[in-house]
Image (cartoon, grey):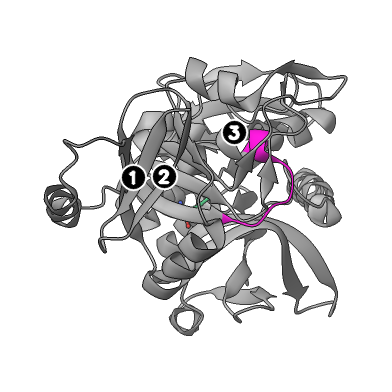
Amino acid sequence: MMKRLLILEDGTVFTGEAFGSNNASQGEVVFTTGMTGYQETISDPSFYGQIITLTYPLIGNYGINRDDFESITPAIRGFVVRELEENPSNFRKDSSLGDYLASKNIPGIQGIDTRKLTRIIRAKGAVRALLTEAGADVNVDEIVAQLQATPLITHHVKEVSPKAAYPSPGRGKRVVLIDFGMKHGILRELNKRDCDVLVVPYNTPASEILAWHPDGIMLSNGPGNPEDVTEGIETVRELIGKVPMFGICLGHQIFALASGAKSFKLPFGHRGGNHPVKDLRTGRTDLTSQNHGYAIDIESLKDTDLELTHVALNDGTCEGVRHTKYPIFTVQYHPEASPGPEDSNHLFDEFIDMMEKEAAKEKQHA
Ligand SMILES: NC(=O)CC[C@H](N)C(=O)O
């Protein structure tokens, strides 16, 4: 086995075994706590540019299959596991995790202390890191200096949003889905409900969206810092009050920013499939799937027309809002699951109900 190094910007060096592709790779290293669901995680575009470490110690045991992708091209920069299963067993298996990552030019490292790495990320927050081959010529000091000097790029939406609009037809409600780096799961849920979906790029002007006469607008998840998505914020600002809207994760953050709220970077993010979220209106707690590094500042909601509807029980941060005047609600977590618990799947039904109610109102007024 070839040796590989994971070098952090604080100078910590982990030595492990290489798997996946052989190239060196750099990115922000983050951890996720899902015990399964690594295929969905690898292909979630919200992880663009990041090196992912899994806190669950054995990864890869059911391989990679045809069905569980959340995008066509994985956008992660590296994969870190305690122990990689090289002989996966599952009736759906197409390939092993290692072979799949190699085919997508993504390097992996195994055999390192992922608990120690996770504790460093928890203590330091965003940690820049490099994955590279071990060897006598590796100059750690030089690499650390270079990592520290590299600014963290956070505007990745343009890399993962489609270049042109495309339809995903149905006979039900017409939904324009603004794709900031969408997981397939969102489209899957809308298709399941027979929505007539038009997926559009992140920088589509509001006038063009309204020209499609949508019954509703869906704001997708996506990578990076929401404040950087200025075109999206502008578009959403113009759409507020004109059409019912439902937003997820980056879509939620963009809607809140467009409404005058503020966002901030969480110390080490929420990533995994077991995050409890309380719905403040019903008192019900759902276990949710999450993947975000930023959050909306609850204090900043005071000066907006938004009401806090959901909070994270682990740290009390904002997990959902609704508009007090218009039919719009958004959540920070992932009701489409993929991977993770499906407790919050009913939010897609609520979106359909909201569009139906709005259409009925308009008929009355006509
Ligand atoms: N999954 C997402 O949409 C993530 C939103 C944003 N990129 C964040 O990290 O907070």
Which residue corresponds to mark 1? 27
Q: Is residue 302 left or right of residue 87?
A: left
Kind of residue sitting beneath label 3: Val
Give how far across and how far down residue 57 sits, in percent: 66, 51
Given contact means CB atoms under 8 Å apart, are the residues at marks 3 and 2 in contact? no
Question: What residue is shown at x 48% (from left), y 43% (from top)?
Answer: 47
Given contact means CB atoms under 8 Å apart, are the residues at marks 3 and 1 in contact? no
Q: Is residue 311 left or right of residue 127?
A: right
Q: Could you tell which of marks 3 and 1 lies nearer the N-terminus? A: 1
Q: Taking 235 as reference, is 212 above or below it?
A: above
Mark 2 closeness class: few <14, some 14–19, many ≥20 residues within 10 Å? many
Secondary element at tag 1: strand
Q: Gap in Å between the C-alphas at discs 2 and 1? A: 5 Å
Give how far across and how far down residue 156 sits, in percent: 35, 40
Magenta-drawn segment:
32-40
The answer to whether the beta carbon of the residue marked 3 is less than 8 Å from any atom of ligand 1 is no
Q: Could you tell which of marks 3 and 2 lies nearer the N-terminus? A: 2
Q: Taking 263 as reference, is 92 above or below it?
A: above
Which residue corresponds to mark 3? 176
Kind of residue sitting beneath label 2: Gln
Which residue corresponds to mark 2? 50
Given contact means CB atoms under 8 Å apart, are the residues at marks 2 and 1 in contact? yes
Magenta-drawn stretch contains 39: yes
